[in-house]
Image (spheres, rainbow, N blue to C red):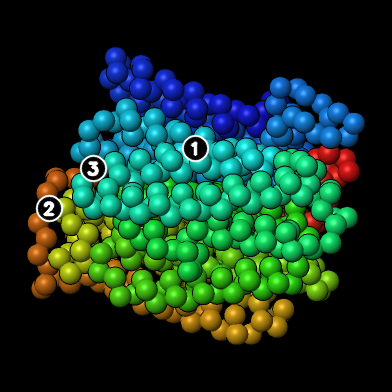
Amino acid sequence: MELIPALYIIIPLLGAFLIPIIGHFVKGFQKTISVIITLFLVFYSVWFYIVGYEAPAVTKVGGWEAVNGVPIAIYLIYDGLSAFIILTVNLIAFLSTVYAMGYIKRFTAENNFYALLCLMIAGMNGVVLSGDIFNMYVFLEIAVIASYALVAFGTEKRELEASFKYQVLGGIASLLILFAVGLLYWQTQTLNLADISAILQYQDQSPALIFTEVLLIVGFGLKEAMIPFHAWLPDAHSSAPSPISAMLSGVLIKAVGVYALIRLFFNIFTITYEVSLLIVVLGTLSMVIGVLLAISQWDLKRLLAYHSISQMGYVVIGVGIGMMIIFEDGNRTVAALSIAGGLFHLINHAVFKGLLFLDAGAIEYMSGTRNLKELGGLSQKMPVTSSTSLGASLAISGIPPFNGFFSKLLIIIAAVRAEFYLLAALAVFVNFVTLGSFMKFIRYAFFNMKESKVSLKAKKLPFSMKFSMITMVILCVLMSLMVFPFFRDILLNPAVDVLINTGEYATKIIGS
């Protein structure tokens, strides 16, 4: 089987086109085709890990070859890093789509929901695969515009307000990114990422280039919702339907935020001390302030949303420490360990936070509320949700043998070995506060019998919702195996190698 990266974009785009048309005439078409599309994309992603496909795979859209060494085609790049993120995106997309089959029945306009979901998946895949910075921006806009509509899908006042806030701040972020793209084109006369990298390695850090880098950090920081650019996230994630909350928190902020930042600042721009320090500081602020804001929340989905900010802080400091070490020409083994920890936590967070949002959706589906003060006694009434919530809570709180423990451990060990002792101490502190926050969740939602005011509004959860939740909690255990060399070599190390070998990206893509 030959790898065709464009299929990751073409197939969900085709689904988004067909669903409103055929779904109008064929009952259930929208659910069936969405599940088939996402399942195929997961299989397609896993298959090339199994067969050991030799990356990078470069697709030149339209078949246009370089003219006088200048790449004029739109490039799609499938290398170790993009393969890792693509697998993460489509795995969570598949499980969220299966979950939605039961959950979304309480909404109208299912055709619109699944069409927008396919559109968002296509946009995220496009961002990850794009080897062209302008088309990265275009795919980013496809993904986020679909997410604006999905956040407002319930059409209640709260959802519309959250979507409006998300659109305003998202629009500002998009404007900053587009302005930065224009500045970068002005400085390099090209939009191809590999070509930009080849040109910039012979240029000094000019004020215009530094300004461009700052614009990109702020723009993608807004998309990722790093502190202090986080204002839109708690409202948007808590207002969206739960499968969309799982997508937003599990993969959207990673594909259009974290991935774009690390791709640009590892493989395109020259790593500098100032940028590395800024990224580490933003990651640390997100990790600490996010968890302190989360622990006081009583709305379950807002609590989870603030924890998304905090947990992504771990990912950012992991890659940020790696950047600092590479700049200082330090121990490459420690840099690789730190970056591996950050990427490991990225996929772990996608799974356990996606599961927690699905659990929150199940609780709201059955009880009609997500206010922890109104819940209680659900451990006997909802045993599957209780068990999966406990597993996900232990995973995000870094309790072995769940996956979150091992990724956080790698980041903390790397921080200690790199002599970032304060960062290591803060990471441990945040983990203890996270544990306390999820002890509150488990106690008030599933026990707390005396104060419970909840009465179930549904007889039982649909099978599709249970399937996704059980699958995810199993993954929370199985993904711990990635700490062992055999599994790490297959899944993590190809992505780490792309980031560690910063100067090889242009050579492998365009031969410069």
Amino acid type of the residue that numbered disc 1 sits on in the rendered structure:
Ile
Where residue 58 sits: x, y (%)? Answer: 75, 34
**Residue wearing tag 2:** 456
Q: Identify the element where label 2 is drawn.
A: loop
Residue at 44% of width from left, 22% of height from top?
17
Q: Amino acid at mark 2?
A: Leu
From the image, which quarter does the N terminus lie in? top right
Q: Is residue 197 left or right of residue 246?
A: right
Which mark, by number, is residue 155? 3
Q: Which residue is mark 1?
A: 142
Side of 304 relative to 398 (left or right): left
Residue 447 visible in rendering: no
Q: Position of residue 434 (x, y in %)?
A: 41, 74
* Above or below, 200 relative to 312: above
Q: Secondary structure at mark 1?
A: helix
From the image, state whether disc 2 or disc 3 is nearer to you. Answer: 3
- Pointer 1 and pointer 2: residues touching (CB < 8 Å)? no
- Name which quarter of the figure residue 466 lies in: top left
Give the class, few, some or many, for how many residues have Cα within 10 Å of label 2's Cα (few <14, many ≥20). Answer: some
* Circles 3 and 1 in contact, beta carbons < 8 Å: no
Q: Nearer the viewer, residue 279 or 128?
A: 279
Front residue of this view, candidates 453 and 137: 137
The Cα–Cα distance between marks 1 and 2, rounded to whole angstroms, is 38 Å
Judge by depth and name the residue closer to the eye, 426 or 206. 206
Residue at screen point 27% across, 48% down: 160
Kindly identify the residue that appears in the image at 14 percent across and 70 percent down: 449
266 up-or-down from 508: above or below: below
How far is mark 3 from mark 1, CA to CA? 21 Å
Q: Secondary structure at mark 3?
A: loop
